[in-house]
Structure formats: C-alpha cells, structure tokens
C-alpha cells in the first residue's frame, strides 16, 4: 500500500538504514556469562517479581537505543498502585532497540523485540534480587520486529516483523531462554507490514495484524512443532492500515485500531472457526487531520475502552455496549505527553500507562471503574524515546 511510507514506523525504519545492526547481543545458552545486569540509578531499590504482593509494583520500559537521545536498554522502574507515582530503579543494558516488551505467564522472564534491520528477540531473566540476566537473543528472520507475545502455554514466543511483513515462532525452554526459530511465515500482497501477533482468548488461534495489506490473518499454532497454519483472512477497507487488535473480555469481539484512516473497527470473532468479521469503521473523535491511532485497551469489566491518538496526543473514551459488539464514543482527554505510542492497564485495572515516545515520558491516569473517567495521577516519568510501558 503506497501510503504506508508515510507512517511513523516507516520513517523510523528509514532512519535505521544508516545505523549499523549495532552491538552484538549475547548468544543463547551462554550459561557461563551472567549477562548484563540492571544498572543502579540513585537509591531506589531494584524491583523484582516478589514486589507484586506489595503496593509498589514493577514497571518495565521499552525504548529505541539507535536514535539520537535514545535509551540504553530496558528501563526498570516501579509504580505505586494506589497513587500511580513512578520511580526509577535501573536499566537492563545490552538489549538493542527493545521497542516492545512482553512477560512470560510465570512472571519470571521478560521478552523484548530488537527493532532493527536485522530483527531479533531477546529473553531476560527477572531475578528476585534485582540482578536481571540477559539470557540471549534469536533472529526473527525478518526486519524491524514491532510486536511480540507469549503463547498462554508459556512454550512459544510469537513475533511480527514489520519491515519484512512476516511472523515468526520461537520455542521457550524451562529456563525462559529462546531456542532456534521453528517457523517463519511471510505475508503476501501489496507491501505487507506485520504489526502485531497475539493468541486469541480461547487459545485456539493466533491472529496477525498486517498494516501494509489491510489484513488480519488467522493461524492455528501446532503446539508440538511450533508451526503456523493459515485458517482464514479478514480484510478491512483499502488504506485503513490496521495496526493493533484488542479483545473484549468476553472473547467474542475485538477492536481494531486503523492507523492510516483514523478509524476503529469492531470485529466479531468466532472461536470455533477462528473467523474474524470486521464491521463498519467508526470515528476516533479526533476531528479532521491525522490522528495516527495507536491501540485500544479495554477495562477489566469490559465496560469501557480507551483509544490512544498519537497526532492530537489524546485518549478517546468509549462506552462498550451490547456485550462488546458496539462502541459508543464518549469524549477525548489529553494524555499528558507527546505521541502516545503504546498504552497499558495495570493488572488491577485501576491505572492506565501511556508511553509517549516524542516527549520521552510515561504518563499515568487513574481509571474510574464505574464511570470510565480518566484522571491524571500527576507528573510524568522521564525515560528517553520510550515506546512501551509494561506494568506488572
């Protein structure tokens, strides 16, 4: 699709053309090398998985390391789940361009994409003493991986290569480390650019969102061989640029953020067949101009959804109706930063985090579970070129 070249990620990829594949990441299986550890910053204690039982909980931050003024690795921070206040604890160095993060179901291993021309994924062991250890990286077989997720079984890592329009599968061993890639599927059509890959809530299928060819692919994952088999395809109107899909808690409907035409699409999902049926696109409430929709998040009770708009730097609030089948636009509120690339809810659902790439800040908002209203939690937390906030 010709206008994909206008997207922010494509501009970033163009910038990568002059950047070397950069620092060599540790090889998997190098048990004798303890790997980079979180660098202390100030007097804040390192945050560990055991912190989850307390009010202060861990927050991991993805960034770009190959851009001017970028970060040096994965940020390690903490947040107060009552106040939303964020404090810094360190950086896990030795991980290049970790622009998107995901955690293993056990909570013991963190995974990051390495969004570079020679794409890779990296595993990091989260130690109780704060000495997080980089377990190594594996090639994704494509360029500029933009997204990754862990299969609910905890045995497979799925990743989407935006630059080359392909999706990959890697096995995860008992230590959390990654094995050699077991599958690589290249999308076809005009200018494919895979932007997201997730497992459906029923665990029966894997969905891959391709921004370049306006398609959501449904796959079945062979959980013994780590191979993907295509089941069906769902297309949206040409030029929509689907970027990110978010399921309603019911598992029967999902919401598709369309980056290029400033719309959101409600999709019906059939767990038996894996078929996704997109409805009519609807407004993000941002008015004329380019809003660069990023993604939606849905409250735990399924009553409200929030849509991040990178152009006007706002969050659109929707009421979710008809069991998830309908979004009703309520209002938009300022996000408190510049270019909210990614948003995430805390596990309790009481806080919404926004990673604002251009301002290099993470902003936090309180979520009213009854009304869906958003309220700022206070000052922004600074982190360079932040692209992802992962609260645990």
Image: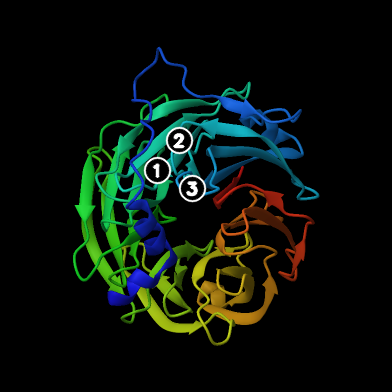
Q: Residues within 10 Å of mark 3 (few under 14, many from 20)?
A: many
Question: From where the camera sits, is residue 273 visible?
Answer: no
User: Quarter-wise, where is residue 119 in the image?
Assistant: top left
Above-or-below relation of 362 to 72: below
Q: Label 1 belongs to which residue?
A: 114
**N-term-proximal mark, 3 vs 1:** 3
Cα–Cα gap, marks 2 and 1: 7 Å
Numbered disc 1: secondary structure: strand
Q: Residue at x 62, y 76 (%)?
A: 318
Above-or-below relation of 294 to 90: below
Q: Residues within 10 Å of mark 2 (few under 14, many from 20)?
A: many
Q: Residue at x 50, y 76 (%)?
A: 325
Proximity of marks 3 and 1: CB atoms separated by less than 8 Å: no
Q: Nearer the viewer, residue 351 or 339?
A: 339
Question: From where the camera sits, is residue 59 visible?
Answer: yes
Q: Label 3 belongs to which residue?
A: 64
In x, y percent, where is residue 111? 45, 39
Cα–Cα gap, marks 2 and 3: 10 Å
Proximity of marks 2 and 1: CB atoms separated by less than 8 Å: yes
Horizontally, residue 191 falls left or right of residue 360, namely left
Q: Label 2 belongs to which residue?
A: 95
Above-or-below relation of 121 to 186: above
Q: Residue furthest bottom?
A: 288
Numbered disc 2: secondary structure: loop
Q: Residue at x 29, y 50 (%)?
A: 143
Cα–Cα gap, marks 3 and 1: 9 Å
What mark, if any, has residue 237 been given in the picture?
none
**N-term-proximal mark, 2 vs 1:** 2
Above-or-below relation of 62 to 341: above
């Amino acid at each position: 699709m010709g206008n994909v070249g206008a997207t922010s990620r494509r501009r970033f990829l163009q910038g990568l053309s002059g950047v070397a594949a950069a620092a060599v990441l540790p090889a998997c299986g190098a048990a004798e090398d303890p790997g980079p550890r979180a660098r202390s910053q100030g007097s804040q204690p390192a945050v560990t998985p055991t912190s989850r039982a307390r009010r202060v909980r861990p927050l991991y931050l993805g960034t770009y390391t190959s851009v001017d003024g970028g970060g040096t690795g994965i940020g390690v921070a903490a947040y107060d789940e009552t106040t939303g206040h964020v404090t810094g604890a360190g950086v896990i160095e030795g991980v290049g361009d970790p622009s998107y993060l995901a955690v293993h179901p056990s909570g013991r291993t963190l995974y990051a994409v390495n969004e570079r021309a020679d794409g890779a994924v990296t595993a990091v062991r989260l130690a109780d003493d704060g000495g997080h250890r980089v377990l190594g990286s594996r090639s994704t077989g494509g360029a500029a991986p933009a997204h990754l997720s862990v299969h609910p079984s905890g045995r497979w890592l799925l990743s989407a290569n935006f630059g080359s329009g392909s999706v990959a599968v890697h096995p995860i061993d008992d230590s959390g480390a990654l094995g050699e890639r077991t599958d690589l599927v290249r999308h076809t059509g005009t200018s494919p650019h895979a932007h997201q890959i997730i497992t459906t809530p029923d665990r029966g299928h894997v969905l891959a969102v391709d921004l370049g060819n306006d398609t959501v692919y449904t796959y079945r994952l062979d959980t013994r061989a780590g191979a993907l088999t295509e089941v069906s395809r769902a297309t949206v109107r040409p030029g929509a640029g689907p970027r990110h899909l978010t399921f309603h808690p019911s598992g029967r409907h999902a919401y598709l953020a369309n980056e290029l035409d400033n719309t959101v699409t409600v999709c019906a999902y059939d767990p038996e067949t894996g078929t996704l049926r997109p409805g009519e696109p609807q407004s993000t409430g941002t008015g004329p101009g380019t809003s660069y929709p990023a993604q939606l998040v849905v409250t735990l009770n399924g009553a409200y959804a929030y849509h991040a708009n990178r152009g006007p730097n706002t969050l659109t609030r929707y009421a979710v109706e008809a069991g998830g089948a309908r979004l009703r636009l309520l209002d938009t509120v300022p996000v408190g930063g510049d270019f909210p690339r990614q948003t995430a809810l805390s596990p309790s659902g009481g806080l919404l985090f926004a990673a604002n790439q251009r301002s290099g800040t993470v902003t936090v908002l309180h979520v009213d579970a009854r009304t869906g209203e958003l309220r700022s939690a206070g000052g922004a937390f600074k982190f360079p070129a932040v692209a992802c906030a992962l609260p645990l």
